Image (cartoon, rainbow, N blue to C red):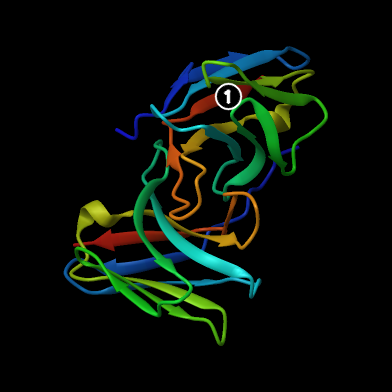
Amino acid sequence: DSGVTQTPKHLITATGQRVTLRCSPRSGDLSVYWYQQSLDQGLQFLIQYYNGEERAKGNILERFSAQQFPDLHSELNLSSLELGDSALYFCASSVERGFPYEQYFGPGTRLTVT
Amino acid sequence: GESVGLHLPTLSVQEGDNSIINCAYSNSASDYFIWYKQESGKGPQFIIDIRSNMDKRQGQRVTVLLNKTVKHLSLQIAATQPGDSAVYFCADHLRSNTDKLIFGTGTRLQVFP
């Protein structure tokens, strides 16, 4: 158990809908990262938040947005969903104080868009 | 139409043999490297890491080798067991002001009896 929690575990929704994925980082970790993993593919970095502020941005679509709240939990909002958005979404957290740069991953949310 | 995903490179080894999983990185400014193991349906888990000022680091049954000259990283697993079956990702950190990691595409390790 990494200490990172994600809810829900599974999500099935229809095209055009909007969903929110939630992540709670490990206790003490200030940084949260979101990744998308499609079937049999690598981890695509979406976005990073550090202590409530956006820190780095990857290949995140304009239909997607995220935020980190004062209690450090984070939410990833996916809107106008398309079939191609079906994927595993992982959240990871780290201390963000330099070396080591290890990130701790949550169990993921499996999103299925029908 | 039907979508076809990329097929991960696959390494098949017999139980008890040693496994070597390779990874190439592109940026000479990478100062830290890490290997993750991802079992089916789970999040990636830390295996071992290495800083760029080292060329070898050993853990329990695993060894990471770093060759900065050719920008190559490898993960060696000794006496591979069925529980080692998973997808293995390498990731590197660029010397910068963030802790962001860049992940490779992954290699699937299959262990057969």
- Spot occupied by residue B62 in the image (x, y as percentages of width and height): 26, 67
Q: Position of residue B12 (x, y in %)?
A: 35, 67
In the rendered image, residue B46, in percent from the top left (x then y), is placed at 36, 50
- Residue A17: name its quadrant: top right
Q: Which residue is mark 1?
A: A111
Quarter where residue A47 is shown: top right
For the residue labelled by badge 1, is the local secondary structure a helix, a strand or a loop?
Answer: strand
Q: Seen from this angle, which residue lies furthest bottom? A: B69
Q: How many marks?
A: 1
Would you say A44 lies left or right of A40 here?
A: right
Q: Residue at x 42, y 38 (%)?
A: B43
Left or right of residue A65, residue B88 in this image: left
Residue B42 lies, with reference to residue B74, above or below; the image says above
Q: Is residue B103 above or below residue B13?
A: above
Image quarter of the N terminus of chain A: top left
Picture coordinates of residue A57, whole percent (x, y): 73, 41
| Amino acid marked by disc 1 | Leu
**Image point 57% across, 16% down: which residue?**
A70
Horizontal arrangement in the rendering, residue B68 relative to residue A107 (left or right): right
For the residue pair A31 and A87, the one nearer the viewer reads as A31
Q: Please give the chain letter of the residue carrying mark 1.
A: A
Furthest-right residue in this view: A62
The crowding category of the residue bearing disc 1, from other C-alpha atoms within 10 Å (few below 14, some 14 to 19, many at least 20), is some
Quadrant where the C terminus of chain A sits is: top right
